[in-house]
Image (cartoon, rainbow, N blue to C red):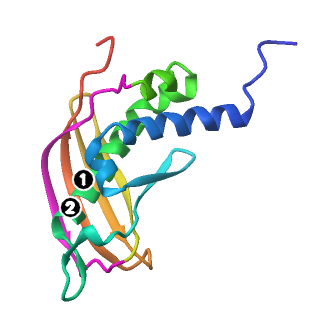
Amino acid sequence: MSGPRPEPVQVVKQRRDAALSALSGGVPYIQYLGIGFERRGDELTAVLPFDDKLIGNPMLPALHGGVTAAFLETAAIIELSWQMLWPDIESGALDPDRLAAGELPRLPRTIDFTVDYLRSGLPRDAYARARVNRSGRRYSSVHVEAWQDNRARLFAQATGHFLMPPRDGG
């Protein structure tokens, strides 16, 4: 044998899922809104399950604009954090048990965030994906798109700039 055996795939998946769950579960407002994340490799999709409390205009009915903005901003911040933590998750240097115990990393802080409301959010589940346009040591730029039934038919999009937390060791 020429070295240690690789970890079983299931162990790696469990470590990734535990880290993501701890990261998003550590923010009470994310829990209140019910936002979850689906992971495929290093790609995240934010999911906002429909709930009556999310309706802003019961006459339409339509999702509240503040909920939509919070959903998009959350998708951006968790994507940035995930990309920052991914190397540590992959190497096993990040212990998901420590994250689950509340030892969460500092999250990126919003500098500015601009939302384009393209159409009313309907009373159904919503999805969002964030794309990091630029990520440096101190500053990052992210674009987020949100849809419901049809990925090509967005109901909102946003662009944000974020102050990145300092990394350990520098």
The residue lying toward the viewer, choosing from 139 and 46, is: 46
The answer to whether 134 appears left or right of 94 in the picture is left
What residue occupies the far front of the structure in this picture? 52
Q: Residues within 10 Å of mark 2 (few under 14, many from 20)?
A: some
What residue occupies the far right of the structure in this picture? 1
**Residue 25 versus residue 62 in the image, above or below:** above
**Residue identifier under label 1:** 73
Q: Residue at x 24, y 80 (%)?
A: 62
Q: Quadrant of the N terminus?
A: top right
Asked if residue 66 lies in the magenta stretch, the reply is no
Q: Residue at x 24, y 65 (%)?
A: 68
Q: Secondary structure at mark 2?
A: helix
**Magenta-drawn segment:** 102-123
Q: What is the x, y in percent for residue 23?
A: 39, 36
The residue lying toward the viewer, choosing from 57 and 4, is: 57
**Residue identifier under label 2:** 69
